[in-house]
Image (cartoon, grey):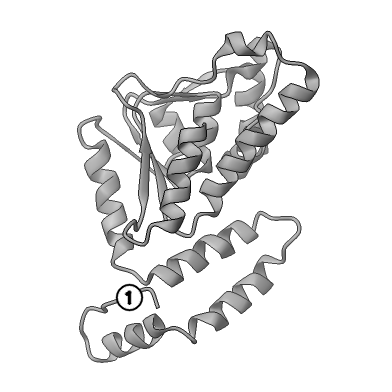
Amino acid sequence: MKELALAIDDVYTNKDIKSAIITGAGPKAFVAGADIAEFLTLSPDQGADLAKRGQVIFQRIEDCPKPIVAAVNGFALGGGCELAMACHFRVAADNAKFGQPEVNLGIIPGYGGTQRLTQLVGKGKALELIMTGDILPASDALSWGLVNHVTSAEELIPKTRAILEKIHAKAPLAIAKVVKCVNAALDKELDGYETEIKEFGKCFGTKDQQEGAEAFIQKRAANFTGE
């Protein structure tokens, strides 16, 4: 988790990074979940601290002004499913499997799973998946709206890169504002419509807005600089 946090910090601060893909190291799993043996030693306060640390890291992913996409290649269970859901969207290999099986251990999701799964698939489906602990195959994850695309394992990264290449061609400041506004729609402390008004207005003080309008009028491709 510490290494993940450092990697996300690099996405935020490194100007050469336009986007990021989070994927598993091998074909078997995206992330199979936490070390269950660790749970035997935790007090209630330590359990809450563990959840808090995870939620802070995952919120950094969700709030990142640059696209972070989950390329799910195998099991995404427990914290792995929560990590995938914290990303801006998800592309899954056809062998991917999703689940929040925490109830089998006498606990619940702690890294935002109860909230993000509900946002993505709706209350009824979220309750069913979390309360049963069932494992959802990629095809069902697609029909439920949990993932955007399902592809072969071989095409998983190329497909994800192709989507990101489209996004790279757009205005970076506008992309960041899209993330902010869409997230505001789900934030009870914010008025999403008011956020959109403010961010829309801010676009008109950027060089990218001028470039985009001029390129459209001149019928040429825009050259955005992120300014």
User: Compared with residue 93, is residue 58 higher up or lower down, i.e. above or below?
Assistant: below
- Of residue 34 and residue 183, the one placed in the foreground of this image is 34
Q: Is residue 84 something that shows in the picture?
A: no
Label 1 sits on a secondary structure element that is loop
x and y percentages locating residue 55 in the rendered image:
63, 38
Q: Position of residue 201 (x, y in %)?
A: 56, 83
Q: Quadrant of residue 212?
A: bottom left
Amino acid type assigned to the residue bearing label 1 in the image: Thr
Q: Which is more toward the observer, 81 or 8?
A: 8
Query: Residue at point 51% right, 21% down?
Result: 33
Residue lying farthest to the right in this orientation? 44
Residue 100 x/y as whole percent: 58, 23
Left/right placement of residue 105 relative to residue 203 reads right
Point out the image quarter for the C terminus: bottom left
Quarter location, residue 40: top right
Query: Does any portion of residue 103 appear in the rendered image?
Result: yes
Left or right: 170, with 41 as reference point = left
Q: Nearer the viewer, residue 146 or 3?
A: 3
Q: Residue at x 57, y 75 (%)?
A: 199
**Residue depicted at 38% across the width and 39% down the height:** 22
As drawn, 158 above or below 134: below
Compared to 134, does 30 lie above or below?
below
| Residue 218, picture quadrant | bottom left
Q: Which residue does the numbered mark 1 point to in the structure image? A: 225
The residue that appears at 62% across and 78% down in the rendered structure is 198
The 10 Å Cα crowd at callout 1, few under 14, some 14 to 19, many 20 or more, is few
